[in-house]
Amino acid sequence: MKNAKTKILIVDDHALLRRGLADLLRYEKDLVVVGEASDGEAAIATAAELKPDVVVMDLVMPVMDGVEATRRIKESLPDTKILILTTFGTSADVSRAIAAGASGAIMKDASMEDQLNAIRTVASGGKVLSPEIAKAVQEEPLPELTERQLVILESAARGLTNKDIATMLEISVDAVKQHLAAICVKLNAANRVEAVAIALRKHLLKM
């Protein structure tokens, strides 16, 4: 339907901030707030029930943070767009959220016009980053991976299993797991999938 409103789910552990954003969106003819959640776990459950078009997601929350909630929502609802709204999240946090599937990130102190434009941009399939966030992400130093770690990560990116990689490199599966764990630490990634996504975005892999 051409006139259908974009359904918004607001996720933030501060009720006042949720209410402020909801009040802002109330006057927009093309947007409607369908629900709110105060932490990542509640966000996953609420998104599954309401199937919003856009989730406006805080990064730092109790129970489950915005990065993990983003990853899980995108796994179950790939068409739902996620916009990170943050106050002091580090560039690494934002990078992890983007790698997990978020379509962008803006600061909570952005103007009302910028917040509305960001929501509409991600709803239409676009990407958005506040200038200060984009600058921080660009200035984030590249992690240094060893040659062996790069080979293992490239192999993981190509879909090889730990056993495949172990056979190829003539090392044990446990050794592969240890390398992958070290890679995740260096890239600030939660798992190998996120590590591959971050490495590709940072052009660390020759693929």
Image (cartoon, grey):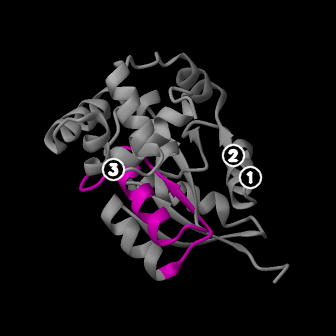
| Nearest to viewer (mark 3 / mark 2) | 2
In the image, residue 119 sits, relative to residue 137, either above or below, namely: below
Q: Which residue is mark 3?
A: 65
Magenta region: which residues? 50-79
User: Is residue 90 something one can see in this rendering?
Assistant: no
Image location (x, y in percent) of residue 47: 46, 73
Circles 2 and 1: CB distance less than 8 Å? yes
Disc 3 and disc 2: Cα gap in Å?
Answer: 21 Å
Within 10 Å of disc 2 (Cα), the crowding (few <14, some 14-19, many 20+) is some
Circles 3 and 2: CB distance less than 8 Å? no
User: Is residue 28 something one can see in this rendering?
Assistant: yes
Labels in figure, total: 3
Question: Which three-letter amino acid code belongs to the residue tagged 1?
Answer: Thr
Quarter of image, res 125: bottom right
Image location (x, y in percent) of residue 100: 46, 50
Q: Earlier in the sequence, mark 3 or mark 1?
A: 3
Residue closer to the observer: 107 or 177: 177
Question: Which three-letter amino acid code belongs to the residue tagged 2?
Answer: Lys
Q: Earlier in the sequence, mark 2 or mark 1?
A: 1
Question: Which three-letter amino acid code belongs to the residue tagged 3?
Answer: Asp
**Extreme residue in the right direction:** 2
Disc 3 and disc 1: Cα gap in Å?
Answer: 24 Å
Disc 2 and disc 1: Cα gap in Å?
Answer: 7 Å
Is residue 51 magenta-colored?
yes
Q: Which residue is mark 1?
A: 121
Image location (x, y in percent) of residue 102: 54, 50
Within 10 Å of disc 3 (Cα), the crowding (few <14, some 14-19, many 20+) is some
In the image, residue 159 sits, relative to residue 133, either above or below, namely: below
Q: Which residue is mark 2?
A: 127
